[in-house]
Image (cartoon, rainbow, N blue to C red):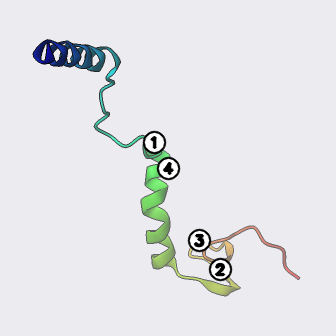
Amino acid sequence: MGKKLFFVGAVLFLGAMLLFNKPVPMYPMASPPILTSEAATMVVLVPLVAKWEGCVNASYLGLVGVPTICSGHTNYHKS
């Protein structure tokens, strides 16, 4: 009687595992944001250009003669 009960329990357990078991995903549930090519370019270039260009806290004429302030900001009002 004990072996039959064990066998029936094992069959029921395995059947339930097959019916209700969901596969475990191979990736984390919170996926990283998908960057467009423009956003990916900006992620790389903004720190590079900021380091190369530097920051000047007074207005000056840029290389092409455009009044510039700080890290390349060209839209400002003179006071």
Label 4 or label 1, whichever comes before in sequence order? 1
- For marks 4 and 3, the one nearer the N-term is 4
Element under disc 4: helix
**Callout 2 amino acid:** Cys
| In the rendered image, the vertical position of residue 19 relative to residue 78, given as above or below | above
N-term-proximal mark, 2 vs 3:
3
Q: Disc 4 designates what residue?
A: 39
Q: Kindly identify the amino acid type of the residue bearing the numbered disc 4.
A: Ala
Query: Which mark is on residue 34?
Result: 1
Q: Which of these two is toward me, 49 or 30? A: 30
67 relative to 20 in the view: left or right: right
Q: Secondary structure at mark 3?
A: loop
Disc 1 and disc 3: Cα gap in Å? 36 Å
Which image quarter is the N terminus in? top left
Report if the CB atoms under discs 4 and 3 are less than 8 Å apart: no
Q: Quadrant of residue 7?
A: top left
Q: CA distance from mark 4 to mark 1?
A: 9 Å
- Residue 21, image x, y percentages: 31, 23
Please report whichever mark, 1 or 3, sits nearer to the chain's N-terminal start: 1
Circle number at residue 70: 2
The amino acid at mark 1 is Ile
